[in-house]
Image (cartoon, helix red, strand yellow):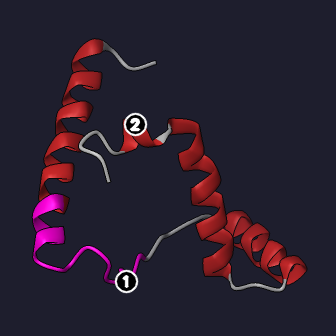
Amino acid sequence: MMNKSTTRRNAQQLLEYAHNQLEDASGGQAKQLKKMTINIDWSYHDVVKRMAILEGVSKTEVMRRAINLYSDAFGDDLLYPLGQ
């Protein structure tokens, strides 16, 4: 569990990020594809690859689905404090 000062700091960082995203959206940059490179343990890569094979989709699609499920736990009100 995070302490209050960490929670406040994280909330402030999220608000700053949200403001920046609004500025990017007004400039037409919000819907561009972004590349993300991650370094994960071999076992995570192995699981993602196996799920991709079983589902007949790309590893990227597996990661998208995983992120969607994880983000559902937070809810849009928390993730998007300024709205979408």
Residue at 19 percent of width and 51 percent of height: 17
Q: Is residue 76 above or below residue 38?
A: above
Which of the two discs, 2 and 1, sits closer to the camera? 2
- Residue 41 in the figure: left or right of residue 35: right
Q: Which residues are magenta?
A: 22-36
The residue that mark 1 highlights is: 33
Q: Residue furthest right?
A: 54
Q: Earlier in the sequence, mark 2 or mark 1?
A: 1
Residue 51 screen position, x and y as percent = 82, 72
Tell me if residue 31 is in the magenta stretch.
yes
| Residue 9, picture quadrant | top left
The residue that mark 2 highlights is: 77
- Residue 56 in the figure: left or right of residue 19: right
- At label 2, the amino acid type is Asp
The CA span between labels 2 and 1 is 23 Å
Residue at 59 percent of width and 48 percent of height: 70
Q: Is residue 75 above or below residue 27?
A: above
